[in-house]
Amino acid sequence: AQSVAQPEDQVNVAEGNPLTVKCTYSVSGNPYLFWYVQYPNRGLQFLLKYITGDNLVKGSYGFEAEFNKSQTSFHLKKPSALVSDSALYFCAVRAPISSGSARQLTFGSGTQLTVLP
Amino acid sequence: DSGVTQTPKHLITATGQRVTLRCSPRSGDLSVYWYQQSLDQGLQFLIQYYNGEERAKGNILERFSAQQFPDLHSELNLSSLELGDSALYFCASSPTGTGSTYNSPLHFGNGTRLTVT
């Protein structure tokens, strides 16, 4: 079965500083990895995804994520945090279609990011 | 705006009752997914429909059921409601969920907040 772990429930960072939100995964075969963000009283919004190719993926709002196969990680990063980045961030994994595993998108438990002014 | 519409936004009902949540997917999307978000269990996949047929099933209780209609809108029916069913229910859609669009991101609605008293 596939799974995602987000080891930090809460991450606090000062505005202007770099931020990292951690994610590790477990899946059979090559993973398809996603990051989503959720603002209060809103649905999840897609930020970026890794399917194949370059391990550094760039997404919306200046976010990027680094895929590390040996560490089974897909950490979300941003060079300079904004107060408006404060939100709940979810990492998600999907097994490749050829794997025969469940094809659903499995989410981590979420990390609340707070950017302090 | 994701293009996914969920109604109602809020629902308050009593234990033992039955409710129906409605979702209209993004124009052109054939797959609809239902997720439950609660504080203790995070974001849980319930069920997926593709072009009117059930495609994948997750942690959906037998008291819950869903369907997707010919116009592609979907309904999630929750019956014999219990206090523990109080949660935010999200609908998401994607183009097909197979083939070249297998890795298309899901687009989420803003959810229906269900409170069971």
Image (spheres, rainbow, N blue to C red):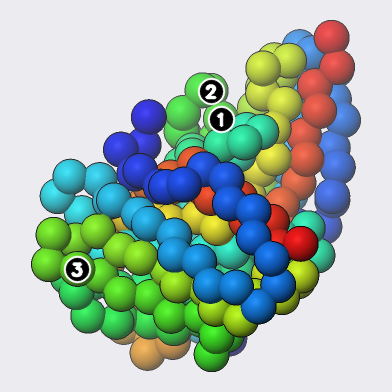
Front tag of 3 and 2: 3
Q: Is residue A78 left or right of residue B60?
A: right
Asked if labels 1 and 2 touch by Cβ distance under 8 angstroms, the answer is yes
State the image coordinates of residue A64 (x, y, percent, origin top left).
55, 35
- Between A63 and A45, the one lying in front of the other is A45
Which type of secondary structure does the marked residue at label 3 adopt? loop
Q: Is residue B84 left or right of residue B78?
A: right
Query: In the image, what residue occupies the spot 35% across and 43% down?
Result: B5
State the image coordinates of residue A55 (x, y, percent, origin top left).
49, 49
Query: Label 3 lies in what chain?
Result: B
Same chain for the residues under marks 2 and 1 in the image: yes
Which type of secondary structure does the marked residue at label 2 adopt? helix
Distance from Cα at disc 3 to Cα at disc 2: 39 Å
Q: Label 3 amino acid?
A: Phe
Residue A65 in view here: no
Which type of secondary structure does the marked residue at label 1 adopt? loop
- Above or below, comparing residue A36 to residue B34 in the picture: above
Q: Which residue is mark 3?
A: B69
Q: Which residue is mark 2?
A: A62
Q: Which residue is mark 1?
A: A63
Classify residue A15 by image quadrant.
top right
Instruction: Give neighbour class at mark 2: few <14, some 14-19, many 20+ (Cα, 10 Å).
Output: few
Same chain for the residues under marks 3 and 2 in the image: no
State the image coordinates of residue B2 (x, y, percent, origin top left).
36, 36
